[in-house]
Structures are given as C-alpha cells and as structure tokens.
Image (spheres, rainbow, N blue to C red):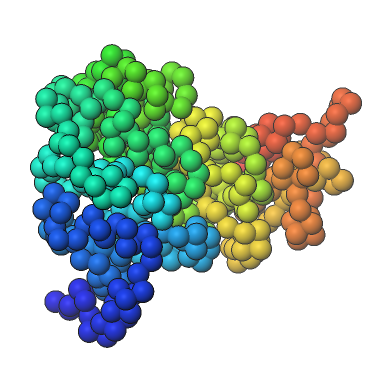
Amino acid sequence: MARIHNRSYLKQTRKDLRNNTTAAEATLWRFLQKSQLDGRKFRRQHSIGNYIVDFYCPSEKLVIELDGDAHFHSPGYERDIERTRYLQSLNLKVVRFENEEIFKAIETVLDKIKSAFNTPTTPGPSFTKEGNINPLPNLNSPPGTGGVPEGRGGFKITSTQNPKIKSLLTLEKPRERKKQQLFIIEGKKEIGFALEAGYKIGNLFFCDEIISPDDLQQLGLESKLLIPVSKDVFDKIAVRENSGGVIAVAEMKLHSLNQVRLSKNPLILVLEAVEKPGNLGAMLRTADAAGVDAVIICDPQTDFYNPNVIRSSLGCVFTKQIASATSEETLGWLRKNNITIYCTYLEASNPYNQTDFTKPSAIVMGTESTGLSETWVKNADANIIIPMQGKIDSMNVSTAAAVVVFEARRQRGDI
C-alpha cells in the first residue's frame, strides 16, 4: 500500500509551517502537546496524502483544522470541501474551528475535541484561556453529559451547556453550517426523507416527553446515535414549533450540475437569486408535487439548508435533485442538454398556457422584487407571462411557479 502519512516530498513544507505557526495554532498547541488532553498524542503540521493538516491524533484518527477568513470564500471554501472529503474517505474524522473560537472559547473547543474521541474520555482538569488548571468537575454526573443516566442513547442531556448542545446551536448560523458542512433537520418525516435520499445522519436528539425511542426505530439509525434530552433543552434547540420532539444533525451534500440525472423528456425548474427561505421552500414543495426532474438554484441568496427552507418545504428539499450554479453555468448546461428555456417575464407577450411545454423544458423564475436578470431574458428561447385579471401585475413567485409547472404537466398528460 502506498504511504500516505508524512510523504518525504512534503517534509520541508511541514517544517516551514511548524516554524511559522499562526497565533491560533500556537494557542491550541499549548493544550494538545505532550499528551495533556486526556492522554491523547497529537502531531502538528502532519501530512496525509497531499494535504498537510493542522493537528492529527493517530489513536483517534482525528484531524483538527483551524480556519481563518480565507476559508470562508471561494476558492478556499471549495478546497476545504475537497480536502475534507478526501480525509473522510480514509475513515478520518475532521473537526474544524474558526481562529476566533480558539481565542475566545478554548474550553468549548477542547470539549468539542474530546467529544470526537472514539473511546471514553477520562475526567481530568479543565483549562482556562490562559492555560491555568481549574479544579476537577463534579463527578456525580458523567463528564460532558450535564445529566443523569437514562434512555437508549446513553445519558439524558439536561443542560444547555452540554458540548453537544452548544455545537448543535452553532448550526443555526449560515456561516457555521457552511464551515462545518453540517445542518439541522427537525421532524421525523423530514429526517426520513433525508435518509431515503442518502444523507448521512449524525446525532439525533429527541425529547422522550414528546416522542418515544420506539417510534424512532423505523428510521433505522443505530441506537448509539439516539440522544435523549430534557424538555427544557429541546425547547432551546428547536427552531420551529411542532417539530415532533426530534432533531437530527446531517452532513451536507455537494449539488453540482454534473450530478443531475435527466429523464428522456425533462422538466426543470430554475430559480434565480431566490431570497426568501419561505418562497424557496414553497417552490421545492411544488417541484415535488409536480414531479420535476430537478431544481436549479442560480446565484442563491439564501442557504437551502436553512431550517426555514426545510420547514417550509416539508422536507421536499431532500426529495428532488437540487443543483446550485451561476446563471451562466446553468445556461450553458441547458443548451448542452438541448433543453428549451422559458423565462417568466412581465413584459413578455406569450401567455404561459399558449406555450408548448411538451418538449424538454426549463421554466425560469426570478425574484419578486426585481424579476429575472437581463442574462436570462436575452438568452431565453421564449419569454412567457401569466395574464393578470386584476389590478396587480404579478403574483407571489412560488404561486406563479406552481401555475406554470402544473400547466406543463397538464400538457404532458400527467394530470
């Protein structure tokens, strides 16, 4: 087997990085060096394949990466995705932190690292930001659980200060979801849709005052992933009302155009610069109901893993193929696949119900505030309009999408 760890051609680069360590790396290394974190040996600037990771724990197969501002913009963000997927393909766990977290919340960072260990951690001293040792924690409760033994998933979490709960709450922020490539799913039905679509589910938190562990068996998840929480904790982590007492953490997927699989006579819904999570969710429900081949979101202004998108779509964000691309990339892809482009446009002269949607078609919708950009209007095969009979000149974009898409289905004899 080819050697993948510390390849010789990267030796000088590893050395240079160690000699020019960042302030965040130096701070974290103070707590990791000399096996002082629960006896785990860490290496810094360790290479795996063609990548050099910030910290690596061989016994736990755990990689720790620290991210500065450059990691949150393309192409740095895209390189991070590729890097993380490679490391995960080697069955390595990857935990990422922002530099700011190291300086402002080192104890929370250390707790997150320990929670990623495969084997149980040994209760030991905790550290302050300055590195001073604090007294041992209260040993009456298991370390890190904030609660008492209960439930199929191990210990019932009764404190919002539990590291797993703190980590979950960070995923309410778009930047954190993007950085960690993780997101939250609320509701048993929605989680079921995600599993059917091949999404990987991590921890699943449930309130046993609302739902029984037996009711979760049909999801087919390992019992060790089911973590019971108290009602107070669940109320804190739940974004929406009536989520059925269950919340899961899932891994994001890549959504590129080249992953879309088309039928012989495809019907595509294209959404340009959609802004409101509620509108995006509603249009994903329409796409599911109408059985479109795929939804392509061009130059998105909202994260389609936003909890409000998942909620308003009733989980339909998982039931259809979704791709994200620029308008130019999407135009080229549609032309390459011989798909006719129909753009909804207020100044168009072609009524939607007098347009032929029986051939391979893409229906393109713009924003409610500004409509479609000139890029789409000029490159359309036909611009179409829904004639208005009242005083207003347009309707809600999600409603308009439903009207046109179901007209296409009617013409095709599907309804």
What x and y, as percent, mark residue 351?
81, 41
Identify the residue shown where x is 45% and y is 46%.
Answer: 176
* Residue at x-position 15% and y-position 54%: 36
Residue 383, placed above or below residue 237: below
Is 363 drawn above or below residue 381 in the view shown? above
Q: Which residue lies furthest to the top in this view?
A: 209
Instruction: Classify 289 as above or below 70.
Output: above
212 to 359, vertically: above or below: above
Viewer-nearest residue: 42 or 296: 42
Residue 404 in sight in this render:
yes
Residue drawn at x 26%, y 50% is 131
Quarter of the figure with the C terminus? top right
The image quarter containing residue 249 is: top left
Residue 66 rendering spot, x and y as whole percentages? 37, 59
Task: Please report the residue visible at 54 percent of the width from the left and 44 percent of the height from the top.
Answer: 303
Whole-percent x and y of residue 290? Answer: 56, 36
Total numbered badges shown on the rendered structure: 0
Q: Is residue 253 visible?
A: no
Image side of residue 8 versus residue 105, left or right: left
Q: Is residue 230 left or right of residue 154?
A: right
Position in image of residue 230 (x %, y %) = 28, 19
- Location of the N terminus by quadrant is bottom left
Front residue of 18 and 180: 18
